[in-house]
């Protein structure tokens, strides 16, 4: 029994080595000798170049949403700050799988052209296009002085129906450069003021140059009214409104306005 088992294992190993050698030989035949003179010289890339699958010529790396991976990276390699993601976003593909390039740099960045980009990947793509059009390259402005912006409220407070005796909260998130401060008002009065049952909290995040704030309420009959989230920095102010009703239904279509106030 042991002899047959080891013989079977030995034969499987031989088959595996044979297939591996065949794949290597096939890859070598597909690549052939490297002729640098045949390599393209007029690439118009949206990111840096990388070696091709035969490690002979330089080709454009892949960017957001483009196919990547495959056997011997036949579908291309992603640029820096990307991964070749499979079915699960931000998880690299397995060997020889085909995926799509996904940017791993999630924070907004300020460019030396004075534009705020959603992430470093988009800035780099814009930089390559700028150079191809004869314009200067775009770098990350580490000082963040070129991209000062009026705050934008990215998560406004919501109209709410609150019950007396409950513990409730309203939340508000704003983005701006410099990072904005947030204050809350109820019917024009800055909170918490003299309201012993109301507290406000705030913290940075969830992304750079964002601020999140809450107003915490131990609900009493007098807490209904118009609540204002106001975000401000050196460039201006923006406010968003929410109506709080105690013990009755509020229409879903009540508007929550954002009102930018330029300084």
Image (cartoon, grey):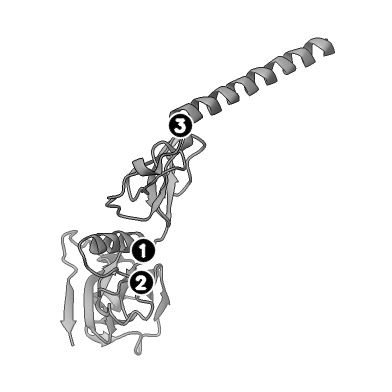
Residue at 43%, 56% (x, y): give it: 80
Can residue 89 be seen here? The reply is: no
Q: Is residue 129 above or below residue 29?
A: below
Q: Which mark is residue 32?
A: 3
Q: Which residue is mark 1?
A: 120
The reply to whether the C-beta atoms of the residues labelled 1 and 2 are less than 8 Å apart is yes
Check residue 67 in the rendering and tell me which mark sits there, or answer none: none
Quarter holding the C terminus is bottom left
Query: Any mark on residue 140, and which?
Result: 2
User: SS at mark 2?
Assistant: loop
The residue located at (17%, 84%) in the rendering is 262
Separation of disc 3 and disc 2 at Cα?
Answer: 41 Å
Along the polypeptide, which appears first: circle 1 or circle 2?
Answer: 1
Number of callouts in the render? 3
Q: Is residue 185 left or right of residue 95?
A: left
The local secondary structure at tag 3 comes to loop
């Amino acid at each position: 029994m042991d002899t047959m088992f080891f013989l079977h294992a030995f034969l499987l190993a031989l088959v595996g080595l044979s297939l591996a050698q065949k794949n290597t030989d096939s890859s070598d035949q597909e690549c052939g000798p490297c002729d640098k003179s045949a390599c393209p010289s007029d690439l118009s890339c949206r990111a840096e170049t990388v070696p091709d699958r035969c490690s002979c010529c330089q080709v454009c790396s892949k960017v957001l949403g483009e196919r990547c991976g495959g056997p011997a990276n036949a579908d291309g390699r992603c640029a820096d700050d990307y991964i070749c993601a499979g079915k699960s976003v931000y998880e690299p593909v397995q060997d020889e799988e085909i995926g799509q390039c996904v940017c791993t740099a999630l924070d907004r960045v300020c460019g030396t052209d004075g534009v705020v980009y959603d992430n470093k990947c988009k800035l780099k793509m814009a930089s390559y296009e700028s150079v191809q059009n004869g314009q200067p390259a775009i770098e990350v402005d580490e000082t963040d002085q070129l991209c000062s912006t009026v705050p934008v409220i990215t998560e406004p407070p919501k109209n709410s129906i609150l019950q007396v005796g409950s513990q409730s909260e309203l939340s508000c998130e704003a983005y701006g450069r410099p990072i904005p401060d947030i204050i809350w008002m109820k019917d024009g009065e800055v909170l918490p003021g003299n309201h012993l049952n109301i507290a406000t909290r705030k913290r940075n995040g969830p992304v750079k140059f964002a601020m999140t704030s809450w107003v915490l309420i131990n609900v009493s009959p007098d807490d209904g009214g118009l609540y204002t989230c106001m975000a401000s920095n050196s460039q201006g102010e923006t406010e968003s409104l929410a109506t709080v009703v105690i013990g009755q239904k509020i229409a879903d279509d009540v508007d929550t306005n954002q009102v930018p106030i330029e300084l």
